[in-house]
Image: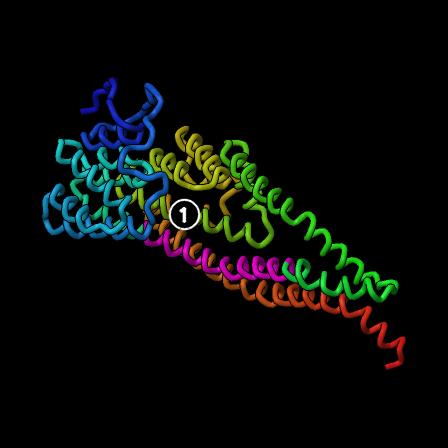
């Protein structure tokens, strides 16, 4: 015990190698890829499995392993009854690798699109500690909590986005179809049109002439933005800008803090070392700015500092979160405190989203009414003017 060893291990990814070594009770201090990782494995589609389906699979596997069923049999049953074709194909492949002698963590790490680093490292910790069913339950609870918070944010954003899209379609339809009808009428009058009417007619002409070009430009801009976001620099700039957005930025920051605390707390409670936990949390954060902050804090912690101090110095995490983490460190219950912080910020997100919607709904309806009403009034102004001149 305690002997330092070096060597090579054949695996699909770095995560697969780490998971396999941990399954053999080997503590990994440093690992590098000897060659480029393989591309996506057969059975995995480019699109990730829906988190809700993954959570259900994880909870079912936890119940079955806890009941004492052999792992291969559990995977066989779940693979045959799984309705999601992508997940079913992956489970079948994982079962084959496990039946061939691999650990569950190593087999799952072959399919990183479905099972990310957090998932496979927790499975490895569960296998090493002989508590796989307990770890699977924690994983299922973690995924379910993540699904809930995402659903809250998505449902909150659905209404304002729908209002904006419908408003744009209505305004475009009025400018494209309705306004030209009035324009031909005004041409016959030969009168000088009021300024608001001329502005609306100019906008209508612009939509008719440049509408297809605007749509093409929007599509090209979206594609360019997607490619830019795919670069490290672009991802940092966009993620940083998102966190600084008025009103929405604070909500996104709270979502990220809750995700960080829940991920790290789940890993620590499963026996994953703090430095490994921070690295995994950074890689699965989904935000480049948060990931950079966590990795910077990891370097300071590796040098001997506490957890809360370096996180506070990044100026990314709220002071309240770092203070609660500091208390958790002092009491020796960091994992439990991280879970409490995650739950607190989940509630903060729910309240903030509700408040934002309460504010946005009347504002958006008022703006839509002003725009549509303004267009209608501008188009009727010449008619009102003509009626007043005729003395009707």
| Residue positioned 34% across, 34% down in the render | 276
Is 225 placed above or below 9 here? below
Q: Is residue 143 visible?
A: yes
Q: Main secondary structure of the magenta part?
A: helix
Task: Look at the picture and state if 188 lies above or below 133.
Answer: below
Q: Is residue 270 above or below residue 157?
A: above
Provide the residue designation for mark 1: 259
Residue 308 vs residue 341, the one in the foreground: 341
Q: Locate residue 375, reporting x and y percent.
A: 72, 64
Image location (x, y in percent) of residue 362? 60, 68
> Of residues 337 and 379, which is closer to you in this image?
379
The part of the image, by quadrant, that contains residue 184 is bottom right
- The 10 Å Cα crowd at callout 1, few under 14, some 14 to 19, many 20 or more, is many
Using the image as rendered, state which of residue 53 and residue 332 is in the foreground.
Answer: 53
Q: Nearer the viewer, residue 370 or 300?
A: 370
The question of residue 162 being in magenta is answered with: yes
The residue range painted magenta reads: 143-172
Quarter of the rendering occupied by the N terminus = top left
Quadrant into which the C terminus falls: bottom right
| Residue 13 drawn at (x, y percent) | 30, 28
User: How many numbered marks appear?
Assistant: 1
Q: Residue furthest front?
A: 188
């Amino acid at each position: 015990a305690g002997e330092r060893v070096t060597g090579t291990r054949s695996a699909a990814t770095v995560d697969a190698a780490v998971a396999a070594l941990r399954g053999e009770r080997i503590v990994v201090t440093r690992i590098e890829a000897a060659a480029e990782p393989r591309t996506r494995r057969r059975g995995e589609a480019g699109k990730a499995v829906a988190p809700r389906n993954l959570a259900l699979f994880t909870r079912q596997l936890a119940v079955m392993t806890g009941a004492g069923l052999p792992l291969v049999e559990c995977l066989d049953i779940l693979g045959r009854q799984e309705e999601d074709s992508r997940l079913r194909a992956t489970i079948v492949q994982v079962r084959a690798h496990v039946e061939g002698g691999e650990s569950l963590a190593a087999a799952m790490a072959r399919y990183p699109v479905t099972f990310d680093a957090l998932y496979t490292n927790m499975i490895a910790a569960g296998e090493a500690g002989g508590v796989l069913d307990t770890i699977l339950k924690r994983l299922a609870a973690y995924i379910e909590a993540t699904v809930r918070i995402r659903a809250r944010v998505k449902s909150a954003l659905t209404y304002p986005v729908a209002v904006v899209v419908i408003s744009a379609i209505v305004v475009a339809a009025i400018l494209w179809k309705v306004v030209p009808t009035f324009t031909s009428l005004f041409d016959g009058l030969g009168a000088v049109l009021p300024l608001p009417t001329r502005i609306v007619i100019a906008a209508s002409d612009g939509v008719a002439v440049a509408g297809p070009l605007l749509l093409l430009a929007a599509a090209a801009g979206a594609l360019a933005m997607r490619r830019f976001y795919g670069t490290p620099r672009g991802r940092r700039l966009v993620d940083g800008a998102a966190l600084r957005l008025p009103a929405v930025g604070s909500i996104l920051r709270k979502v990220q803090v809750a995700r960080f605390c829940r991920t790290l707390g789940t890993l620590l409670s499963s026996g994953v070392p703090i430095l490994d936990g921070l690295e995994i949390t950074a890689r699965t954060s989904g935000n480049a700015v948060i990931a950079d902050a966590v990795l910077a804090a990891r370097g300071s912690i590796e040098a001997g500092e506490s957890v809360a101090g370096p996180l506070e110095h990044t100026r990314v995490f709220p002071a309240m979160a770092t203070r609660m983490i500091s208390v958790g460190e002092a009491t020796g219950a960091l994992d439990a405190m991280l879970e409490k912080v995650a739950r607190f910020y989940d509630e903060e997100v729910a309240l903030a989203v509700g408040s934002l919607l309460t504010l946005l709904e009347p504002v958006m309806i008022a703006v839509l009414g002003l725009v549509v009403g303004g267009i209608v009034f501008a188009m009727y102004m010449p008619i009102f003017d003509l009626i007043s001149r005729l003395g009707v």
